[in-house]
Amino acid sequence: MTCSRTYDPAPETPALAFVDTLAPRPYALGRESLAGLGGTEQMVARIAGALARDASVEVRQARRDVPTCEGGVLFRPFDPASPAGTFVVVTSWKVAVMLRQHHPAARILLWLHVFPGRHNRRMGAALHAAGIEVICVSASHAAWFADWLPGPPPRIGHIHNAIDDGLRPDGTALDRDQLLFASAPHKGLREVYAAFAHLRARIPSLTLAVADPGYLAWNAGRPPEGVVQLGRLGQDDLHRRMRRSLCLFYPQTAFAETFGLVIAEANALGCPALLHRGLGANDEVVSDPAQLVDATDPDGIATRIAAWRDRRPEVAVRPEFRHSAIVETWRRLLAPASADTAPTEAIGAEPAG
C-alpha cells in the first residue's frame, strides 16, 4: 500500500499514525533526513516504513510544515484533530492524553523511549484513566516504569528496538589498540575519559575514538591523551569503525540506557561492548555477560581489556532484536484482534504489577 505524492489535506483515515512532537526537526525515511538525529527518530522511521508495506501509515510531526510521501509513508504536520485507527505517540504522555480527548474511540499507545523524571509521576494515573497502553523499549525499562509509577498503572509492555537484519561481521581487520565511544557525550563520556586515562597508563598504545552524533552539545571535560575526535559519522563509516575496534568502550555509571541501540549494533557487527553491570538495559541487550564489568573498578577494566587484546570475544546480536522479528511483533500488537488485549500479553511479556 502506498500513499499519494499529491498531498490531500483531508485524506482518508489511516490505519496507523505515529505522532512525534519531540523531534528537533522533521525527518522521513532517508539517511540524509535522519543524519544527526537520535535512535528514537531512526526507530520511528524504520518501523513506520516496514508497517506501511501492508497498511496505511502516517508519521505526524510537530515541526513539519510541508508534507511528503516516502516509501509508502505519509509524513505530515501534526494536527490533534486528525483521526486515525490507532495512534502510536512517541514518548510524550501529555500528547497521548490530549489525543484521547479528540478521539475517544481510537486505540492509543504511548511508545516510551526514556526514563521519565519525577515531575511526570502523575502520568501513570492519567494514562490509566485515558485507557492508553504503554510500550517500553526493553523488559528492564518496562519493569522500572511499572515500579516507579504510583497508583494504578496503565497497561505496560515492551518491544525491543530493531537492529538491521544485514548487520554482521565481514572479516574487517581488527585494530587491537582502538577503542570506540559512539554515543552523545551526555551519556557518561566524562566518566569514560577518566576510565580511559587510567587504562592508557597501563597500555600506552591504546587510542579512544569518539564518534559524537551531534544532536546535543555537552561539556565532557578535557579529553585525555590518546583520544581521537571523529565528530559525526555516517552510518556506514560508524559500522566500519565498530568492525575494526577492539570494543565499544562504555564503562560509565551516570547514564542508563532504556535499550542501547549502539550496543546491540556493535554486537551484531562482532564488536564487544564493555559496559557497567546492572545499569539500565545493559544486561538485557548484550549477547554475552562477559561484556559486563564494574565500571568503578579501573583495575578490573584494565584486566578485561588486556585479556581482550590477546583474544577478543566472539559476540553476536540476540536474534529477537533483528528488524524482521521486531516488525512482526509490532504487527501482532497492532492487529485488530489485539486491541482488547494488554500489550504485555500481546507481545508475550509478563503483565506489570
Image (spheres, helix red, strand yellow):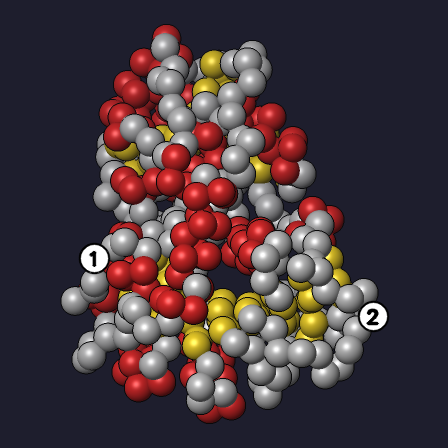
Q: Is residue 65 above or below residue 182?
A: below
Residue type indicated by callout 2: Thr
State the residue position of label 2.
6
**Left or right: 207 with respect to 280?**
right
> In the rendering, which numbered label is found on residue 350?
1
Provide the secondary structure element on which disc 1 rests: loop
Q: For the residue carrying disc 2, how many other residues have a C-alpha within 10 Å: few (<14), some (14-19), or many (20+)?
A: few
Q: Is residue 192 visible?
A: no
- Where on the picture, by quarter, is residue 153? bottom left
Identify the residue at the far right of this view: 6
Task: Give the image location of residue 279, x and y in percent.
Answer: 28, 46
Provide the secondary structure element on which disc 2 rests: loop
The quarter of the picture where the N terminus appears is bottom right
Task: Give the image location of residue 13, x and y in percent.
Answer: 62, 78
Q: For the residue carrying disc 1, how many other residues have a C-alpha within 10 Å: few (<14), some (14-19), or many (20+)?
A: some
Task: Please state which of residues 199 and 30 is positioned toward the viewer in this rendering.
Answer: 30
Task: Please state which of residues 179 and 238 is positioned toward the viewer in this rendering.
Answer: 238
Identify the residue at the far top of this view: 310
Structural distance between the alpha carbons of marks 2 and 1: 44 Å
